[in-house]
Image (cartoon, rainbow, N blue to C red):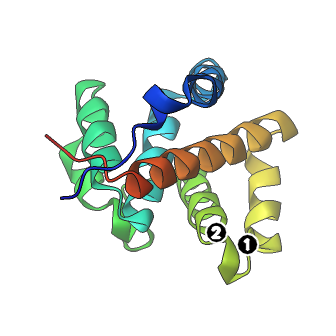
Amino acid sequence: MEKRIDIQQLEPDAFKAMRVLENYIQHSGLSKTYLYLIKIRASQINGCAFCINMHTSDALKQGETAQRIFLLNAWKETGLFTEEEKTILAITEEVTLISQNGLSDETYRLAEKLFDGNQIARIIMVVVTINAWNRIVISTKKTVV
């Protein structure tokens, strides 16, 4: 694989800003489970092997089951996820695939029934942030070692 730039080295302030956003997310009050589901699912959609590897490994260490991770890309077809998790996964997919209609009114209304406004804002910010990380990693061809 060809060598590409290292944004962290070349533009440390930009990378620092991303880390500040990541720190906010880690301390936002959303459960680790919610964070991992969002990060893994968005990374699957985006095809970011580096992030899939990192977040699935972290999720397993935090007690997530292998079965749920294995079936995450088919979450709609299983009974393994709660209503809240399914809503978060729908938001993740719709925001990640923003050009395909974006966050639907149906999904947003369901989220309003399950989460308060701050929680919805945090969920969206997690999705936006992992999508940014995926784009950085894929564009710079960071590899799994």
Local SS, label 1: loop
Task: Answer few, some or many: residues within 10 Å of disc 1's Cα (few below 14, many 20 plus, some between 14 and 19).
Answer: few
Q: Circles 2 and 1: CB distance less than 8 Å?
A: yes
Per the image, label 2 sits on a secondary structure element best described as helix
Q: Which mark is residue 102?
A: 1
Identified by mark 2, the residue type is: Glu
State whether residue 64 appears in this view: no
Give residue 34's position: percent from left, percent from top. 52, 39
**Residue 17 appears in the rendering:** yes
Up-down: is 42 above or below 21? below
On residue 94, which mark appears? 2
Left or right of 119, for residue 89: left
Nearest to N terminus: mark 2 or mark 1: 2
Q: Residue at x 45, y 35 (%)?
A: 33
Between residue 94 and residue 68, name the one nearer to us: 94
Residue at x 37%, y 61% (from the top left corner): 44
Query: In this view of the protein, which residue sits in the foreground, 87 or 20?
Result: 20
Residue at the extreme left of the image, as rendered: 145
